[in-house]
Amino acid sequence: MTDLSTMNRFVGRVAAITGAAQGIGAAITCRLAAEGAQVAMLDRQTIRDDFFPTSAAKYTVDVTDHQSVSAVIEAIYRQFGRIDIWVNNAGIYTSAPFTEMRMEDWQRALNVNLTGAMVCMQSVAPFMVAQRYGRIINVASLAGVIGFPNSAAYCATKAGVVGLTRSAAIDLGPYGVTVNAVCPGTLLTEMGYKVDELICKQNGWEPGTFLKMRAQELPVRRLGTPEDVAGAVAFLASDDASWITGQALVIDGGQFPF
């Protein structure tokens, strides 16, 4: 386990995280704050005050609403004077056989997972360009790299996030802004349990069966945690990764070694 008490990589840095109320977003928030960052938490739902750093700024925002996102970014900038790190973590999962995928579910996944990331990146980039420094990390998915069954909308939107990451990295690199993605595999999160519930129901299995099977299939023999992803995000957000951009880092316990 990393001893964060001796690490201060983000002292003087300001980090904003979408989808910060739970799961991966909450873990990223706590990790960056533990290493000295001032953090701004963004989410559609209410963010608990008792779980997160007391110094964290909390904002309610819909990432698909360009005007709302812009207003929140302006507020963060007014409060802290800069925005150094932006983590696009907000996302949803939808599941259906390909021929039964409803267009409204497809559009909703597209709006949140891909358009939401674009809206946030386009809104925060000018601030980073002006200060000639920035780290943008997009939370994509292993599903966006290899494809999963009954997950057309999720796979397509997360693959889109990877493509968006690589394109933005080229455009923003000359201004000192790096853009990378992380692609988690199966995690013990609310979304992970939802996927387990859906797959087990489709196959007539007891709840939890899919997660147990997946853990035994991995070389490391365990599923990932939000903290596993947070550690990778912290690296990409740090100056240790200043020469890394346009990359999609797979974090999957060796499920699909490339």
Image (tube, helix red, strand yellow):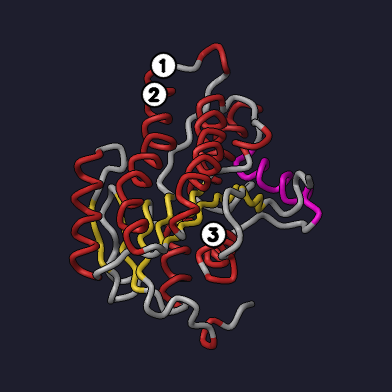
Q: Which residue is mark 3?
A: 226
Disc 3 versus disc 2: nearer the observer? 2
Does 22 lie within the magenta span? no
Q: Which residue is mark 2?
A: 107
- The picture places residue 38, in percent across and down from the top left corner, at 34, 73
Closer to the chain start, of discs 1 and 3, is 1
Does 211 lie within the magenta span? yes
In the rendered image, which quarter contains the N terminus? bottom right
* Direction from residue 73 to residue 231 in the image, left or right: right
Q: Are marks 1 and 3 in contact (CB under 8 Å)?
A: no
Q: Amino acid at mark 1?
A: Met
52 is higher (above) or lower (below) than 95: below
Q: Amino acid at mark 3?
A: Pro
Q: Are marks 1 and 2 in contact (CB under 8 Å)?
A: yes
Question: Few, some or many C-alpha atoms within 10 Å of disc 2 (few <14, some 14-19, many ≥20)?
Answer: few
The residue positioned 23% from the left and 52% from the top of the image is: 60
Marker disc for residue 159: none
The residue positioned 38% from the left and 34% from the top of the image is: 115
The residue positioned 32% from the left and 59% from the top of the image is: 130
Q: Which residues are magenta?
A: 206-219
User: Which structural element holds mark 1?
Assistant: helix
- The picture places residue 250, in percent across and down from the top left corner, at 66, 50
C-alpha span from label 1 to label 3: 30 Å
> Can residue 229 be seen at all in this image of the molecule?
yes
- The picture places residue 179, in percent across and down from the top left corner, at 50, 52
Check the image and name the residue furthest to the top.
99
Question: Few, some or many C-alpha atoms within 10 Å of disc 1 (few <14, some 14-19, many ≥20)?
Answer: few
Q: Which residue is mark 1?
A: 103
